[in-house]
Amino acid sequence: MKNPRYMLTMYKQITIQTLHKQGMPSARIAREIGCHRNTVANVLERDTVIEKQTRVKPSGFEPYEVQIKEWLDKKTSRRRMHDILHDTYCVQERYDTLCKYIQKHFPKPVAAFGVQIVEPGEVAEIDFGYLGMFPGPLGGLVKTYGFAAVLGYSRVGYFGLCYDQKLETLIENTYYSVPCHFVAKEVTVRWNEHLVRIICEGEQVAVHHKSRETGNYVTERSHLPDYKVYSHTEYQARFEAKFVDMGTDAHAYFRMLLEQKESYWFRIARSILGLREHYGAEAVNASLKRALYYGVRDVITIKNILERKLYAKETEPKLLDGVTTDSLFTRELTYYATGI
């Protein structure tokens, strides 16, 4: 059978066949229908009616099919292909026509999906979707996401709103410890209203009571490595030994911290030890001598002493206590008696 090259609808084809059965000549049928007599002859030659009429028309991109395939292999963009075909080969086809040609002749392989069979409560499918800017917990507009979690076995889903896409947010910004030998390993976290369970390779390695506070760190003492398990006095002794190594003035400054900053002395001490790594023990010891003289307990001020090398300068007499004098900016009279 010849390729159809006519554009007659199904109804016109039926009309042609009907008129022919009634004895009307082909030339008159052609005039009545408004087509060529050869088209009438082609319709009468067929036994069936073609429902969808098509016109076979070659694409303007067919001569460049091999070149287009090479471009696709090189990940060349379709826009770039169209520009090259237009500028170099004078192809006048439109860009959307090129896209349809590629879609038809070079279809992308369909990705295969497998059905995942899991045990009850083993896997949950989690997804986030950006919803827009909505009032947040503090009343201001913030980025808001829709959260969806669907259990793999029962297909039961949980849906809610959140303001970022972090797992720790879903458990109220709380951090829970695991035994130290599980560091850098991937674990599974399961929780309910009261407990948080941590599982690694199918074995439960930790269980915590769910914290009701936001941003809290929940650490079991048994999870710490041996070198971090010590009493409060041992903790203090470790820091004191490091200050003794720096010098007598550093040790005296540490004892002053224990007396005046009893609740959070370790924060200042830890920062000072960090300065020692950068400026050296000798410079830090001299700076702490000056800081002790002036009663400085601010780490930023101690750092300024180190940066500006104020520890190398002589100390001036301290101002008198404001409780016993009318002005804070007074000195003892002996300061001015240098020439006597």
Image: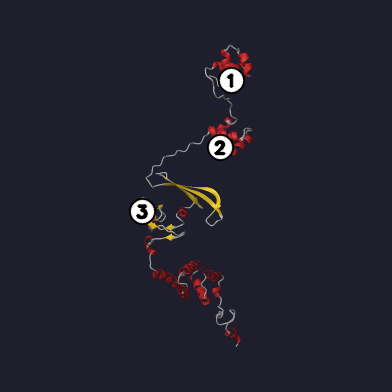
Give, as a three-letter code, the residue at label 2.
Trp
Say which quadrant the C terminus sits in: bottom right
Q: Earlier in the sequence, mark 3 or mark 2?
A: 2
Question: Residue at the spot x=39%, y=54% of the render?
Answer: 198
Q: Nearer the viewer, residue 116 or 97?
A: 116
Question: Residue at the spot x=55%, y=75% of the render?
Answer: 312
Pinpoint residue 4: horizontal percent, then vertical percent: 56, 22
Residue 204 is tagged as 3
Tell me if residue 129 comes above or below residue 12 in the rendering: below
Residue 244 is tagged as none
For the question of whether residue 144 can be seen, the reply is yes
Q: Which residue is denoted by mark 2 in the rendering? A: 71
Q: Which residue is denoted by mark 1 in the rendering? A: 12
Mark-to-mark CA distance, 3 and 2: 53 Å
Q: Tell me where residue 23 sits by quadrant.
A: top right
Mark 2 closeness class: few <14, some 14–19, many ≥20 residues within 10 Å: some
Q: Which residue occupies the extreme top position in the image?
A: 23
Mark-to-mark CA distance, 1 and 2: 45 Å
For the question of whether residue 187 can be seen, the reply is no
The secondary element bearing badge 2 is classed as helix
Q: Nearer the viewer, mark 1 or mark 2?
A: 1
Mark-to-mark CA distance, 3 and 1: 76 Å
- Looking at the rendered structure, the number of numbered marks drawn on it comes to 3
Pinpoint residue 34: horizontal percent, then vertical percent: 63, 19
Q: Which residue occupies the extreme left position in the image?
A: 203
